[in-house]
Amino acid sequence: MFCKNCGKEIDDKAAICLYCGVSTSESEKPRQQEATNALAIVGFILSFFIAIAGLVCSIIGYKRAPEFGGKGKGLALAGIIISAISMAITLLYIVILLVMMGSAISSVV
């Protein structure tokens, strides 16, 4: 058998290549594709456009991050923060508009 890392001939029963030290059983296994935390990504993107949907997806993605080895936890946290700030700014904007409309109506009457 030949080592898949260095290409040198090694014993068929060898667990490790004597020349480069790479495990022969590990080099023969196909690499598995790592799973990604899609809800964290979706939540982060939605937080810029639809804050409430971004908040919900980001919270779920944050809670599911341990299932993916912690991947996406930072994106989910950023989505939560951006969504919360966006919703707070929108709420403040609505309150300011209502106050301005109230003062405009009272000055007309």
Image (cartoon, rainbow, N blue to C red):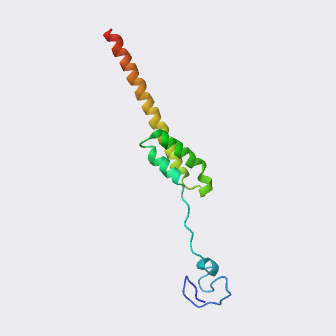
Which residue corresponds to the image point at 44% horizontal and 41% vertical from the top-left? 50
Left or right: residue 87 versus residue 15 is left
Q: Give the number of marks.
A: 0
Left or right: residue 54 versus residue 32 is left
Quarter of the picture containing the N terminus is: bottom right
Q: Is residue 95 above or below residue 24?
A: above
Provide residue 93's location: percent of width, then percent of height: 40, 28
Which residue corresponds to the image point at 36% horizontal and 19% vertical from the top-left? 101
Provide residue 61's location: percent of width, then percent of height: 56, 49
Residue 96 figure quarter = top left
**2, 59: nearer the viewer:** 59
Left or right: residue 49 versus residue 36 is left
Which residue corresponds to the image point at 62% horizontal and 84% vertical from the top-left? 17
**57, 48: nearer the viewer:** 57
Provide residue 35's location: percent of width, then percent of height: 56, 61
Q: Is residue 82 above or below residue 104?
A: below
Quarter of the picture containing the C terminus is: top left
Provide residue 108's location: percent of width, then percent of height: 31, 11
**39, 107: nearer the viewer:** 39
Q: In this view, does 108 lie above or below 94?
A: above
